[in-house]
Image (cartoon, rainbow, N blue to C red):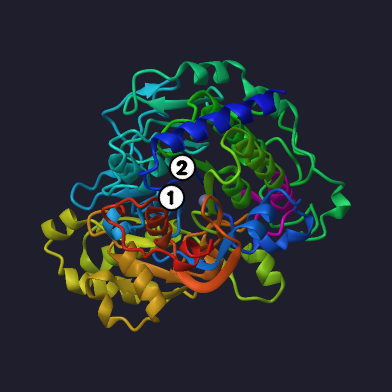
Amino acid sequence: MKRILNSILLLCAIHTSYAQSNNNIARPRLVVGIVIDQMRWDYLYRYYARYGNDGFKRVLNGGYACQNTTINYIPTYTAPGHSCIYTGSVPAIHGIAANDWIDNATGKSWYCTQDDNVKSVGGSSKAGKMSPRNLLTTTVTDELKLATNMRSRTYGISIKDRGAILPAGHLANGAYWYDDSTGNFISSSYYGNQLPEWLNQFNNKKWADTLLRRNWNTLYPITTYTNSIADNNNYEEIAKNEQTPTFPHITEKQSYKAIRTMPAGNTLCMMLAKKCIAKEQLGQKDNTDFLCLSLSSTDYIGHAYAPNSVEIEDTYLRLDQELASFLRYLDDQIGEGNYLVFISADHGAAHNAAYMNDLNIPAGSFTDDVIYKELNTFLKEKFKTDSLLRAVMNYQIVLNNDKIKASKTDPQLLNKTIVQFCGKYPAIAHVVDMNNCNETPLPQPISECLINGYNTKRSGSIELIYQPNYYEHGLKGTTHGSWNPYDAHIPLLWYGWHIGKGESFKHNNMTDIAATLSALLHIQMPNGCIGTPIEGVLQSKN
Ligand SMILES: [Zn+2]
């Protein structure tokens, strides 16, 4: 009954809005961006046979798939990924050079959404000192608000602060992220001095407790997980309270942080997204609203268990069901055809290196600590100066420019020495001094990724390109960050308002997403956008 009533109300609403706005530009009532953290493109097909008809398959078969979309910068990390999707820009321009970086001028360490001038709202003090201020360009969500004289409303939701904040942009009405110390969703004073009442009510229900108590067992009998290696293997991290990396994962007595590394983290975000749509009446007013939903548990689970695990398979089978339920919710609340959804990822991930080695495929892991220690010792001896390096991080070497100046070290000789030294490591394929990157012979796609990803103020000036399937991580689980297809090839699916059925294998860059959204909405591109609208998407309806 409630559903029928909703539909009638919606019909009336649509009717009035058409009557009032014949001359208005056609726009969807609501845009929902779903960014799935660490979703490799091949997960769409690896588990295809086991997906239901109403989740990924509904979007794949009823919408438009850009099958050859890649990330056109490095490092392929979460904060740059979310920033790129929503700004159409790259770290060289939008400034989100990594999740963490060192400011080259001051030597100060920064977290991507760190803002010491704001206060936490609704939670522990440190977790809330966040804002989009370090993002130097506008987002497509900002541009939508600018285009509608602020009448559109934009929200960001994620377990990760950066997953909520960066997509929702500078002008967001709200951005909500998970606080490990309380199990609540919180915000910062950047957005206002208190949480909306509906969010307090949501937090008071203590859903995290309920979800942790359910533990994590497989959705189906474990013998049916034939797309994954054995549940008990040597390639996975073992949780602190467990002896083997196997199901069931008992979470009932774990801290709130455990939600991050289980599918329930996605469940919680989906619940909050539905609540936000209902309570803020998104898509029910006269202007297009925008909800940015970033699902991050996929990334924590991927880091711990890697792509071939039963855990990842189970995570995506569950996510498929959650997606189906979320789309049904949008049908009910907004009406089929009235909302536009896009699904993508901030980056992918490599196969576990030890697993690849066991299959006789070249792979390996290597850590920044080793490089830092050995290189620093070598430089100390050669230049008679300690600490010429600030850090090795983000597959980059960050030089200590103050120390170089004060010690009168010849910068050119120093850079050349570092390039030669690091080039000797078998794990490293290329070492590039970004001051003369043109002199290093590199395949064009890699040099493009390097230049796009290099922010002169926030990146290390010497870049390390690892061999394929080598990464900066321990031997258990996996990580990402490279230019290689496993990290850089992302899903990009469009569904709903003005989207027809189809797929294309023409190459697109991640930067084209914001450009395409801007074209669909007839709004200005974000101010650092270097992407191009994807014609196949725009013409799919014809
Ligand atoms: Zn990650």
81 in relation to 336, above or below: below
Q: Do the residues labelled 1 and 2 touch (CB within 8 Å)?
A: yes
Task: Categorize mark 1 by other alpha carbons within 10 Å: few (<14), some (14-19), many (20+).
Answer: many
Regarding mark 1 in the picture, which secondary structure is present there? helix
Is the CB atom of the residue marked by disc 2 within 8 angstroms of ligand 1's nearest atom?
no
Residue 82, label in figure: 1
- The relative height of residue 420 versus residue 457 in the rendered view (above or below) is below
Residues drawn in magenta: 304-318
Q: Quadrant of residue 120?
A: top left
- Left or right, residue 242 beside residue 431: right
Q: Which comes before the other along the chain, label 1 or label 2?
A: 1
- Out of 381 and 309, give the one closest to the viewer: 309
Would you say 49 lies left or right of 467 here? Answer: right
Q: In this view, does 248 lie to the left or right of 276?
A: right
- The CA span between labels 1 and 2 is 7 Å
Circle 2 SS class: helix
Residue 329 image position (x, y, % from top left)? 64, 36
Residue in view at x 51 percent, y 30 percent: 13
